[in-house]
Amino acid sequence: MFIDVLGSVAGLLTTISFVPQAYQTLKTRETHSISLPMYIIFTSGVFCWMIYGFALNAWPIVAANVVTFILSASILVMKIRYG
């Protein structure tokens, strides 16, 4: 039980920390200072964590990474689209 709570808190904190960047980018569409290779690697890594969570049936990992994947993929798409 403690491990699930710890995983949930960790996922919540890391996901929440990502929200301001995603909000600012989606609001302004300003992506000039964002590194394309970094976001490709980061989004791919988050996708892998999400799949890993599904494979382990570890819902704290899945939940956190689904949200983070959506946010990071949105920024990645905007970076590619608006350069």
Image (tube, helix red, strand yellow):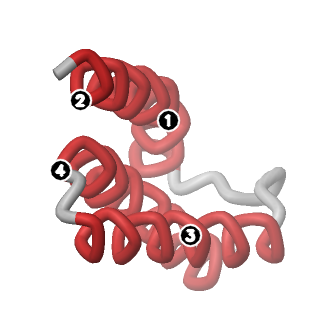
Residue drawn 77% across and 73% down?
36
The Cα atoms of the two marked residues, 3 and 1, are separated by 12 Å
Locate residue 5, reporting x and y percent. 24, 20
Task: Please report contact status of discs 2 and 4: CB closer than 8 Å, yes or no.
Answer: yes
Of 10 and 79, which appears nearest the observer? 10
- Residue that lies at the very extreme toward the front in this rendered image: 1
Sequence order check, earlier mark of 3 and 1: 1
Of 24 and 41, which appears nearest the observer? 41
Residue type for callout 1 = Phe
* Mark 2: secondary structure: helix
Circle on res. 67: none
Of 46 and 56, which appears nearest the observer? 56
In the displayed structure image, the side of residue 37 where residue 44 appears, left or right: left
* Mark 1: secondary structure: helix
Residue under numbered circle 4: 59
Sequence order check, earlier mark of 2 and 1: 2
Q: Is residue 70 above or below residue 1?
A: below
Of 2 and 13, which appears nearest the observer? 2
Task: Please report contact status of discs 3 and 2: CB closer than 8 Å, yes or no.
Answer: no
Sequence order check, earlier mark of 2 and 4: 2
Residue drawn 39% across and 51% down?
68
Sequence order check, earlier mark of 4 and 1: 1
The Cα atoms of the two marked residues, 3 and 2, are separated by 24 Å
Q: Single out the mark in the foreground, 4 or 1.
A: 4
In the displayed structure image, the side of residue 70 where residue 34 appears, left or right: right
Q: Single out the mark in the foreground, 2 or 4.
A: 2
